[in-house]
Image: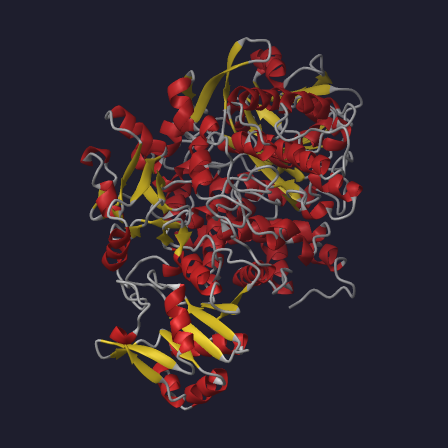
Amino acid sequence: MTKRAAIVLCGGRSSRMGRAKAWLPWFGKTMVEHVVGVLQSVVNEVVVVTSADLDLPVLGMDVRIVRDREAERGPLAGLREGFEAASADATFVTGTDAPFLGSAFVEEMFARGGACAPLSDGHVQVLCAVYGPGAAEKAQMLLAAGKSRPRDLLESQGYQAIAAEELVSAPSRAPWEGFNTPEAYLSAIRSVDAKATCVVELLGRAAKQAQKLGAESTREVPVGTLGDLLATWPKKLGLVDEGRVAKRYLASLGGRDLVRDLSIPVGPGERISMIDALAGG
Amino acid sequence: MNGFHMAYMRVDLTTGESARIPIEAKILERVLGGVGLGSWLLHREAPVGVDPFAPEAPLVFAFSPLVGTGVTTSAKFAVVGKSPLTGGLCDALASSHFAIEGKRLGIDALVFVGECDEPSEWVNGILRPTQNWGRTARETAAALSKEGRVAAIGIAGENRVRYATISAEGRHAGRGGLGAIMGAKRLKAIVVSGDHDTVAAHSEEVERQARRLRDRARGDATAKYSEIGTIGNLLAFDRMGALPTRNFQESHFEGAEALSAERWQSDRKHRRASCADCTIGCEHRYGYKAPGGESKDVRIEYESLFALGPLCGVADPDLVLAAAAKCDALGLDTISAGATLAFAMECGERGELSGGPVFGDDPSEWLSLIATREGLGDFLAEGSRLMAESIGGDALSRAPQVKGLELPGYEPRTLQTMALGLAVGTRGADHNRSGAYEADFSEEANRLHGDARSVALAIESEDRAAVLDALVLCKFVRGAFDDLYDESATLLNAVAGTDADGAEIETIARRIVDLRKAFNIREGWQPEDDTLPARFLTEPIPNGPAKGVTLPRERLDFMIRSYNLGRGWTEVGWLPKEALRRLEVELDLEGLRSSIERSFPEGIIPE
């Protein structure tokens, strides 16, 4: 029986997003948990490739996590790490920002046999594709030859390009549709649940100030950027100053990220705590 | 040189005799006062390998050049000794008029050696039997207040509880068990009153600088402390998965809301107060119902709150506040008391200790047993490290301590810059000599994944703390400085008439850190002492917002190695020969190198 594996790449810098995409909330899970969960129902083994400095949520004992030793060399180097760890006959590859990935679609891709990738609007979706056997060695050879595109690897395996419209199990939003910006992420959320909300709470001095102004200190509000959420409080509270969270405060996102950048997105079900910047002491 | 009296008083409690011993200006210029001067005196006065409870063990009370100048928060003193809890150098600070009056004796430090032959008190040069043995520090201070300002121990100190405090005006030199050293010397109280004012070299400039600092220490630089107090940390830490809970098994407490400043400010009686010479007013007192139903109030800080609350699984505010008041009265370090109790609670759950406390128990009952060393309290009075060593098995991996000092309320796995600070601190697990948590609570460091940047920030934080603790200024004014080193130099020059610059102040900071480390090496420090309990390096956070977060041992080890190299030490943390030679020469510490050579099998100190 063919051994199937899947690789999830999540070591990217997520610089335009401002937060690690793997940790972005997606309706009760983090993005990487969501994607891994979809894949686990279809493959024998899931390998998650992450960067040296990005830790991941607990993904279970049966998920292998490998570090990308040469993250600066691009996605092919990360894929090589994954292929080396997976050693399967057929391996599905995806990024971590794949909210619309479904198990039926992955199953259909495997059913095509051999290396294959969707072709959408003239683009080969190399991070939503199946790679054939021997991929680790081929990736290594390509890297040694100075090549760093996953497409080079697909081509070396004689892949089939499948027109998007031929894929019967693709949902209304394409499985290869990811997001690189806060707007794209928020749009993906709203397409699933137009009323998705998060919770913002003011702690410490901010809570005391809110009390003085007669404003509540905790609110459930529609998802948005941090700036959108803080704009729902009176300006007098001084939560925002010069286009960032005011120096006296920090925003704790989901108990993980501490930020001042107002463009950072907040996901469904997430809790934002506005804390005093002088925490500790 | 102004600002100093250029001498310390050495009191031999065995004979009752005192001697005024001069200190050269060059030494004071190189270590300043407070923890710097105290560390230097400890090197000079402590025999190598001395038992902290032996008569020969010195106990140092060090003042600073700024004491008596009216600079905000400067009325502080440092107590320095060899800790009975850690076996290493311990320096603890307290704010009170004791600092001002102590310096008015015309000295920069008091050093007590020897041992009284009966419970005694030292009152302005006179050693006499005390009637206060068995009383609380507060009762003792009240009885002696007409004769001067008082530093005293409570019942815990009398009974040599290894984490007993020294108390002055309700503030404690709290960590490391220095109160137990006083107890071992049978010295109940020290009373000081003098008439030697601090004369500044440039008094108008001092006034100008003091006014500037006071003005800047208003508003955002300190408002968190004055408006909310440190207990504002509790809910914020909880939300970030950084609130140690049930002996550091978890980092999120289901009862956090009930113990929060946000809740208490609206549903409890609340008032504020200030230390001597302080314009911040960070002291927040909250009302509680004492066990007999009586309404009382008590000063509460985050460290006491976390240690006696979430760490022990206690969510009832009245129980936590009553326990904090009990620690005050008995003279117990709240962090070590709470952490030791929490450790005993987990040992009980695991069947390693029978008849002990369980999570959620009222801590107060146990605190009394600890202070009097009755029953199991005698075991708990030894602190978590000695308990774990006695219990055996893998208990040490769960004892919440580094070098014997119990951890403060910062979860190392989710505050990884702080994890480094806790691991390498000369005092042990400590949040006052390393403020590395500041980096974690900022956008500068990745608090969940410590790296080289975290290391640099941890070193900077230790150096800044060394300056503040040598001058001695409260950490809560740290936000009022733009450039701590330059502005400290300006203050020092105005008071002492020196011409130091910021670079020299930074050098002093580094020297003080080296000096402390040298003392620990002298007393047997080994590289493996710089680490965290194995729990933090092997167990992921099990639940809450930080579920799954880990601090792998390799990561901590990398940070420790980088820290040592960043300090100019060897990779594993020895002071190289050149650094020791520099300390010997600059600080007249003849014999330092030879005393340290004993730590090396072949007597060879690394280059």
Q: Say left or right for B314 vs B122.
A: left
Residue B167, by quadrant, is: top right
Residue toward you, B113 or B433:
B433
Q: Position of residue B268 (x, y in %)?
A: 43, 17
Q: Residue at x 47, y 54 (%)?
A: B448
Quadrant housing the C terminus of chain B: bottom right
Q: Is residue A281 visible?
A: no
Please, is residue B232 above or below residue B434 in the view? above
Residue B257, by quadrant, is: top left
Q: Position of residue B530 (x, y in %)?
A: 63, 54
Q: Is residue B487 visible?
A: yes
Q: Say left or right for B107 vs B376.
A: left
Residue B445, by quadrant, is: bottom left
Q: Position of residue B8 (x, y in %)?
A: 61, 35
Please, is residue B221 above or below residue B528 in the view? above
Residue toward you, A141 or B286:
A141
Residue toward you, B62 or B447:
B447
What sort of colour scheme is used for the picture?
secondary structure
Q: Say left or right for B104 vs B405.
A: left
Task: Count the labels in the image.
Answer: 0
Q: Say left or right for B541 vs B220.
A: right
Q: Residue at x 43, y 73 (%)?
A: A92
Residue toward you, B135 or A8:
A8
